[in-house]
Amino acid sequence: MSGYKIAVLIKQVPDTSSKAGVNPDGTVDRARAKKMLNPFDKFALQKALEVRAEHGGEIIAITMGPPPAKEILAEALEYGADKGYLLTDKRLAASDTLATAYALYSVVKYLGDVDIVFTGLQTTDGDTAQTGPQIAERMDVPQITYLEKLAVVDGKIHGVRVIEGGVQKLTTSMPALITVANSAKPLEHKRFHNVHSVKELLRNEEELANKIFTVNLDDISADSSRVGLVGSPTVVGKTWKLGEKGGSCALFKGDAVSVEVAELVDKLKADERGIEELVQ
Ligand SMILES: Cc1cc2nc3c(=O)[nH]c(=O)nc-3n(C[C@H](O)[C@H](O)[C@H](O)COP(=O)(O)OP(=O)(O)OC[C@H]3O[C@@H](n4cnc5c(N)ncnc54)[C@H](O)[C@@H]3O)c2cc1C
C-alpha cells in the first residue's frame, strides 16, 4: 500500500438534541438515548481525508461501544473512510478513560503499522479530552493536541495547534497521534463514493462484511483485567442533574473587586450548608 495508514477514533454519543435519560444511580441511560456520531470526531475525520487526498493511503475508523455503534462506522464510510473496526465486548462495560484508552490502543496495535492516529478533541458525553493523549502515551509516540492545520512533508507532520492567545507550530515524525481542535476545518459534505447511505450499507450484509469488522478483546489480544470495572480506578463520587438544585442568586457590588470578593467569602463562611455543598 502506498500512502499512509491512518486511524480515526470515533465515538457514538447520546444525541444532545434529544432528552437523554438518567438512571436512578445518576448514570446516563445510554440504552434509551438517541445516538449520534460525536461532533468533535468529524473534525478528526476531515483531517484524515485531507492527508489521504494528498498522499494516498487508507483511513480506518475505529470505535469502541455496544453493537449499535456500527452505525457511526457506516457513517464514517459514507464520509469517505475505507474501513471500520468496532471493538465490542461485555467486559468493557464501566470502563473509565484509563481502561478505554488501553482498549483503543490495543485495537491500534492490532491493526499494526499505523502512521497517524487522529482523535477528536473531546466527546460531548464524557468530555474529559483524556483518551487521545493517553493512547499516545501507551503507543509511546509523539502527540500534537488541539491541532488546527497540518501539512505532511517528507514523512513529517507540520502542525499548527491552538493555544491561549495564539498558535504554536510543531513538527513531528510518524507514527504520531493528533487530537483535532473544533476550530479546524469542518467535515465536508458526504461524498457517497464508498456507499450510498448508512441505512443501505447496514442492510447490505455482504458489503458490510467487507468494510466493517467486529472484534472483541480476545481477537485483539487485550488483557481483560485492564478494562471494565476491574481495570478502572476512577470512582464517581456523585452525579446530579444540572439545574436540579434551583437556588438563589446574590450580587455583590463594591468599590473594588477585592471588596466584592471579601463580601462573597464572608457570606459563604456564614452559610450553614458548608462550602462543599455551596460550590457544587
Ligand atoms: C467509572 C466510570 C464508568 C464508566 N462506565 C461507562 C460505561 O459503562 N459505558 C460507557 O459508554 N461509558 C462509561 N464511562 C465513560 C467512559 O469512560 C468515557 O466515555 C471514555 O473513557 C472516553 O472518555 P471521554 O468520553 O471523556 O472521551 P474524550 O477523552 O473526551 O474523547 C477524546 C476523543 O477520544 C476518542 N474516543 C473517546 N472514546 C472513544 C470510544 N469509545 N471509541 C472510539 N473513540 C473514542 C474520540 O476521538 C474522542 O473525540 C465511564 C466512566 C467512568 C469514569
Image: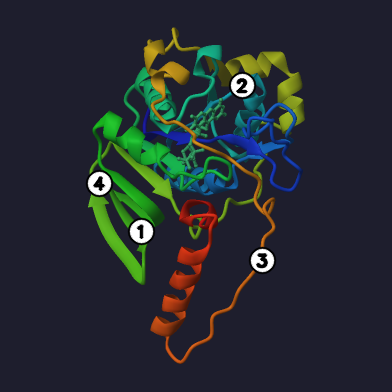
What's the amino acid at mark 1? Arg
Q: Nearer the viewer, mark 4 or mark 2?
A: 2
Q: Which mark is residue 208?
A: none
Q: Secondary structure at mark 1?
A: strand
Above-or-below relation of 42 to 138: below
Residue contact at pointers 4 and 3, CB within 8 angstroms: no
Above-or-below relation of 77 to 202: below
Q: Which mark is residue 66?
A: 2
Of the pair 51 and 228, the residue shown nearer to us: 228
Above-or-below relation of 134 to 49: above
Q: Residue at x 31, y 36 (%)?
A: 136
User: What's the image's color scheme?
Assistant: rainbow
The residue that mark 1 highlights is 161
Residue contact at pointers 2 and 3, CB within 8 angstroms: no
What's the amino acid at mark 3? Ser
Q: Earlier in the sequence, mark 4 or mark 2?
A: 2
What's the amino acid at mark 4? Asp
Q: Secondary structure at mark 4?
A: loop
Q: Residues within 10 Å of mark 4 (few under 14, many from 20)?
A: few
